[in-house]
Amino acid sequence: MDYDFNKWMSDYRVISAVGENDEGGIDRLAYSDYDFAARTEMLNRAYGMRLQCYLDAAENLWFSKPGTDPDLPPLIIGSHLDTVPNGGRYDGVLGVMAGFQVLRYLVDNKVEHRRTVELVAFSCEESSRFSLSTIGSKLACGLTTPEKLRNYKDFQGHSPVDFLSRLRYAPDTLEERKRHIKECLGYIELHIEQGPVLESYGTDIGIVESIAAPIRLRLEFTGRSDHSGACPMELRHDALAAAALTITEVERLGREEAKYRSVATVGTINVPHQALNVVPGACTIQVDIRGIHRDSMDRIYEGLESFLKKLEKEREIRINRVLLSDEDPVPLDRSLGEIIERNCVKTGLSYRWMPSGAGHDAMNVAKLIPAAMIFVPCRGGISHNLSESVSEKDLRNSIQILYEVVMDICR
Ligand SMILES: [Zn+2]
């Protein structure tokens, strides 16, 4: 595959930097103006290449390069363009841009291929805005509905549905999209690893066997606000202190299950009306439990539940549990993985089979059609961080392996 890497890189720099803030991080939150701006950049390029473009009812952006045999089910490749707040330049966007280069190569070099190749940029993959991840692919795959999404709100009180209806949301087209995906041969997502394994072992490519799933909860503690000077310790119902105990218990439960590769995190805490001289009467935290073994995830969840019951009694506070998501770990398709393996061997790239600790759109698509993931190393395993970084060698490898796999399947 002979192409101008520097030309790709200059395109990459433009699109991956949309939403850059003063610190150098990227604020391309789902459905934000920057998110739309990045899509527009992609669309402008795609029109120039005469690719077919389509925006579905879930705000997912599709590009299609038709093959010569319209009877063959298409192959889908892709990832996402949105970032976490103050995020990096590779999470999601690398998969989309590597896929874009594959399409560009096919167009520029008039490469014949029988099977149609479709590239998708799924919307709202990151959970940082609505505390729910992969919203675009969930909608397109029929795994959630706009009605259910109304319960999810960002800090300004917007639900994802507000943004869908802002454009041209129509429920029947979601159905159409699901039907279309089901007719496709498979889905391949290239993504940075977001962990340290590939770099530590000096491996070029990860082939993902299964994707860990999250159980996510919001815990709303209600105690009683009191004067921090006048209320003696034995009469207090301190919601923040109860939440603090819960945070360390979540960590303890996670550590206990670490041998099964499960993890447990409290990532947010919110104390309304906080004041130095008030015993906190309310506090909200969010818990993120993930694993590739359901039993292990359930043990953390159940351990937390019995801890909360005890805590409510001991401290005479109320704890409202809101289940934000509860998903099962998803095994990916073995035969698609073996095609990736075969092409690593062919191109001389080292590889290893591995699980994905993070969730990805592939886990939703895998419910409908065979899905696979290609991981590439990122420096230090750092992700969701402005210092996310991928070496030039690994960027080149990303495009190369994706191209080989696409051609293997679509030629
Ligand atoms: Zn991602």
Image (cartoon, grey):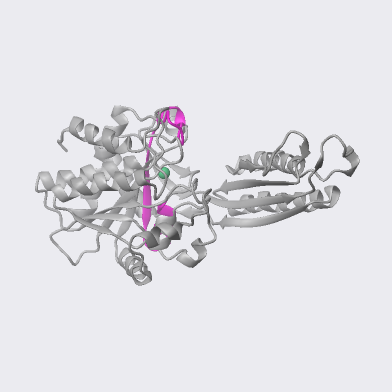
Q: Is residue 14 magenta?
A: no
* Drawn side of residue 146 relative to residue 121, left or right: right
Of the 4 image quadrants, the one containing the N terminus is top left
Residue 370, magenta (yes or no) = yes
Q: Residue at x 37, y 58 (%)?
A: 370
Residue 373: percent from the left, percent from the top? Answer: 38, 47
Residue at 19% of width from left, 45% of height from top? 45
Residue furthest out toward the left: 110
- The region drawn magenta spans 361-388
Instruction: Write down the quadrant of residue 275 in the picture.
Output: top right
Residue 343 appears in view: no
Between 245 and 284, the residue placed more toward the observer is 284
Left or right position of 47 against 333? left
What x and y, as percent, mark residue 287?
Answer: 62, 47
Q: Residue furthest bottom?
A: 172
Q: Residue at x 50, y 45 (%)?
A: 128
Q: Nearer the viewer, residue 232 or 337?
A: 232
Number of residue marks: 0
* Residue 150 image point, x, y percent: 51, 62
Which image quadrant shows ligand 1? top left
Q: For this view, does 94 lie left or right of residue 270?
A: left
Q: Residue at x 62, y 40 (%)?
A: 259
Please state the horizontal and vertical placement of residue 312, each as a whole percent of the image. 80, 52
Q: Is residue 292 visible?
A: yes
